[in-house]
Amino acid sequence: MKKLICFLTTLFALTMTYAQIVHATSLALVENQVQVGKMMINLPAGQWRVLNSSDARTAIDNGSQGGQVERKYLIQLNEKNQFFAAIFLSATKYSTNVDRWNDSVCERKDTLWIQPLDGNFKFPACLLIGHVFGFWTSVPNNDFDRVMFDWYKQHKVELPKTALLSSYRKYFSGDFIVASYFINPELVGFAPDSGTTWGSSQWHAGVIKEDAAKVKYVEALKTWSQAIEPSHRNSLMKGTPIGGQLSALPNSK
């Protein structure tokens, strides 16, 4: 009887592992580059799965509907069904007649790091690094994010309490690009976040300075973010990126 129970337990475990592989591999696979809106965008090294893709309308400074954009959300899971990383990409499909974009993200003062680029208040441009506490724990209030939230829940993907964020955004005339990267710090060598709020998170700017390893990793992520900026800028300005595949996300502390 014990042997039978052990056999059934093993069989169940193997079945679960197979199911976890299938629910990820059933998603469209992309490598090296992906088309988003009117732009071809380089991707970090590795295989990425397209979890969601849809069109939307932008909001301009007077609150009215602007031009049409395309959004894509790509993921990487490991063999244990753990979230490793995700990419959110958004870019215009057609140029919009606009004299100011409604985006205040580049004005944030609560990030781990932010670097203004050559934009201005009408056409923002910046790189930033921050942390997302309570990663996918709250039910989203928009249809696009709800797809990811439901998929993660349905397939019992193991998510970190806190994810790290590296984001590039740039607006130029009637076009823009946003490339945001979400990384699970628990899979690059760090213990789960013991904080209970965004402000008490071990990845908060006011707390992280006490941890040399975390500071070092953010510095590596900063260097990586600055290195990929020219490629994304060229996607916006010329429609195609510079060079080939981006370097892999920093994957160890």
Image (spheres, rainbow, N blue to C red):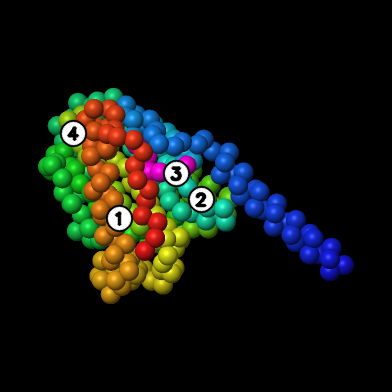
User: Where 204 falls versus 147 (above or below)?
Assistant: below
Question: How would you classify the magenta stretch by its main secondary structure?
Answer: loop
Residue underneath mark 3: 46
User: Where 216 falls versus 248 (above or below)?
Assistant: below
- Residue drawn at point x = 57 percent, y = 56 percent: 80
Element on which disc 3 rests: loop
Q: Earlier in the sequence, mark 3 or mark 4?
A: 3
Place of residue 11 in the rendered image (x, y in percent of width and height, measured from the top left): 75, 56
Q: Earlier in the sequence, mark 2 or mark 4?
A: 2
Q: Amino acid at mark 2?
A: Leu
Residue underneath mark 2: 77
Element on which disc 1 rests: helix
Q: Earlier in the sequence, mark 1 or mark 2?
A: 2
Crowd class of label 3 (few under 14; some 14 to 19; many from 20; radius 10 Å): some
Residue underneath mark 4: 172
CA gap, disc 1 and disc 4: 25 Å
Place of residue 203 in the rendered image (x, y in percent of width and height, measured from the top left): 33, 66
The verdict on residue 3 being magenta is: no
Relative horizontal placement of residue 32, taking residue 156 as reference (left or right):
left
| Foreground disc of the pair 3, 2 | 3
Q: Amino acid at mark 3?
A: Gly
CA gap, disc 2 and disc 4: 34 Å
CA gap, disc 3 and disc 4: 30 Å
Element on which disc 2 rests: strand
Q: Amino acid at mark 1?
A: Leu
Depth order, front residue of 166/216: 216
Q: Earlier in the sequence, mark 3 or mark 2?
A: 3
Q: Earlier in the sequence, mark 1 or mark 4?
A: 4
As drawn, the label of residue 221 is 1
Q: Quadrant of residue 34?
A: top left
Place of residue 79 in the rendered image (x, y in percent of width and height, measured from the top left): 57, 53
The magenta-colored residue range is 42-47
